[in-house]
Amino acid sequence: MRMSQLFVQTLREFPSDAEVISHKLLVRAGYIRKLANGIYNYLPLMWRVIKKVENIVREEMDRAGAQELLMPFVQPSELWQESGRWEVYGKELMRLKDRHSREMCLGPTHEEVITSIAREGIRSYKQLPVNLYQIQSKFRDEIRPRFGLLRGREFIMKDAYSFDASQEGLEKSYKIMWEAYTRIFERCGLETKAVQSDSGAIGGSISHEFMVLVNDKAENNAGENDVFYCSKCDYSANSNHAVSVLNSAETNGKFEKAQIIDTPDTGSIDELAKFLKVPSSVICKSLVYVIDGKYVVALIRGDRTIEETKLMNAFAGNEIRIARNDEIEEIMSASGFSAIPGFIGPKGLKNVEIIADETVRELKNFVIGINQTDKHLIGANWGIDVELPKKITDIRLVQEGDKCPCCNSDLKVTKGIEVGNIFQLGTKYSKAMNATFTDKDGQERPFIMGCYGIGITRTAAAAVERHHDEYGIIWPVSIAPYLVTVVPVSDIDEEQMNVATSIYNKLLEKGIEVLLDDRSERAGVKLKDADLIGIPYRITVGKLIKDNLVEFKIRANNETQTLTIDEAIEKICNIS
Ligand code: ATP
Ligand code: MG
């Protein structure tokens, strides 16, 4: 492709609304253009990258025995009602009505549709296992679309669904997908870590996320997930799922007698600990949440933090948020109290569910709120002064310094971008939607399902997060829009243009994806653009051609060599 004809506009500045480097660079280098919040045009260079990622995914999925199909983007609400998700999916599901007032939605994922396909198409165990996948646009009305392609509202996903006759079968399908994913991301030039994760709204029990770790750059906040991993063994998990062995902490408050004392202006745990001159680990913290519209008070040791996904899962909820002040007021007045946040406690509360993290169990002679502003109970003990809640489970966030649940070594934390995930769904959808097959023994059984997603556009953006420098993008060869760009230094020097064009034609003949920068721009502009756009190799045709020489540049390390024209061409042919 001749650059003079390529549809690309590079910008001098980064866009003002971009926070992370992949968003900044993809806009500035002319790959994407925003149409609306979280909705992007994929311009020709981007589309080439996307197709490369898609093809790698396709090849590896096919190799793993999966079959490609394409399901509709618009789905009828009836299927979602059958699965029970129409009510619970929340605002990410973009709902609309057709001209006959039938309710529809834009597909955020396709479990319902694929289950209806299997229900009709698979009758017997003899047809199993089957793995079906598609590569398609998805729409999710994300609450915070941001970071460009990393979290869009419309994005491209590969989603695959496996159907098996038994749990062992599912485990085998899962392993095959795990291996395919490992190869896919490797081929895309991305090192990933498979970490245990929460299964969220999709359901099921076992799931793993493939994370691109991005913590090595301190300024980088593109990794939206905290990943805890063991310094010794293989254990690693998303923070929403990670568990740990706690470090020992002081849990005996040493207050000899239970009494209510004045604790003015101690609305935070830090202020209270300072005021009482005690470690925060002898305070029982009470936090008010709203889970699917219901009030929940969660208790946890003062030095620890609630993990909201774990808390929500403890109530099999779908939406969680911290309660607003007016809601806390409402709880207080319903229970006959008037305390402000910071002084809340479980005792005497009406119309709320109470749950405690395991950390509160061992507290002795501790400090706790009693729903009176500027007062706390000190020297409290479970069963004597306050009832230990019946619902006690792990709802805490792991912290660095905690120990590995498998081997007791130190846990460390890093940031990750989730590029793909795999779920063992089990029978959640097949049971709800009555999708069954006849097993060997003649019995009707629900399919045992798995589902497997890869964010195609997110993977491309993650590649930019991992591979760039101060000059621009550095595409891995496997997903670069073009392999090489041929740049004549001067477009008015006829000989340079002739040599450049002849190199370009020779590479084209060999089937190589090559650009020729034939624009009448200053050399500096062309060379800067080549770096910004991130083409892996550059052949610069300048004055040296009088000796039959050109400059050969490798973008990955910015090294240049002087080669003869034939050597340069040969080198490129050997790479591709
Ligand atoms: P996240 O936790 O990041 O929202 P998810 O758990 O909702 O992801 P899935 O529903 O399993 O993700 O979707 C499969 C894959 O699709 C994810 O691994 C991710 O790569 C990609 N993906 C999900 N949401 C988005 C989005 N808003 N923009 C771009 N890619 C996305
Ligand atoms: Mg999501």
Image (cartoon, grey):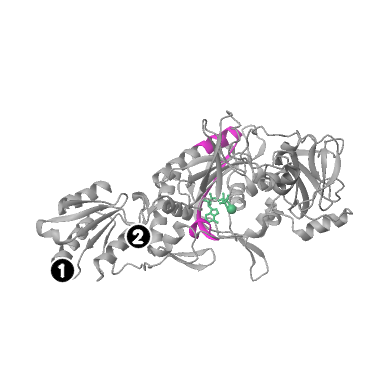
**Any mark on residue 301, and which?**
none
Crowdedness near tag 2: few (<14), some (14–19) or many (≥20) residues, C-alpha within 10 Å:
many
Where is residue 298? Give x, y as percent.
75, 46
Marks 1 and 2, how far apart in space? 25 Å
- Asked if residue 84 is positioned above or below residue 299 in the image, the reply reads below
According to the image, label 1 marks what residue? Answer: 493
- Asked if residue 187 is positioned above or below residue 168 in the image, the reply reads below
Contact flag, marks 1 and 2 (Cβ < 8 Å): no
Instruction: Say which label, 1 or 2, has the lower sequence index.
Output: 1
Q: In the visual, does 35 lie left or right of 431?
A: left
Is-magenta flag for residue 149? yes
Q: Is residue 64 visible?
A: no
Q: Amino acid at mark 2?
A: Ile
Task: Mark 2 and ligand 1: say if the CB distance to the nearest ligand atom is below 8 Å.
Answer: no
Q: Amino acid at mark 1?
A: Asp
Where is residue 472? Give x, y as percent.
37, 58
* Segment colored magenta: 148-175
Residue located farthest toward the top when viewing the structure as drawn: 407
| Mark 1 residue element | loop
Is-magenta flag for residue 360? no
According to the image, label 2 marks what residue? Answer: 533
Q: Which of the pair 247/524 is nearer the observer? A: 247
Q: Is residue 234 visible?
A: yes
Q: Which of the pair 20/345 is nearer the observer? A: 345
Identity of the residue drawn at 32% across and 50% down: 556
Q: In the visual, does 296 lie left or right of 137?
A: right
Where is residue 488? Give x, y as percent.
21, 63
Task: Mark 1 and ligand 1: say if the CB distance to the nearest ligand atom is below 8 Å.
Answer: no
| Mark 2 residue element | helix
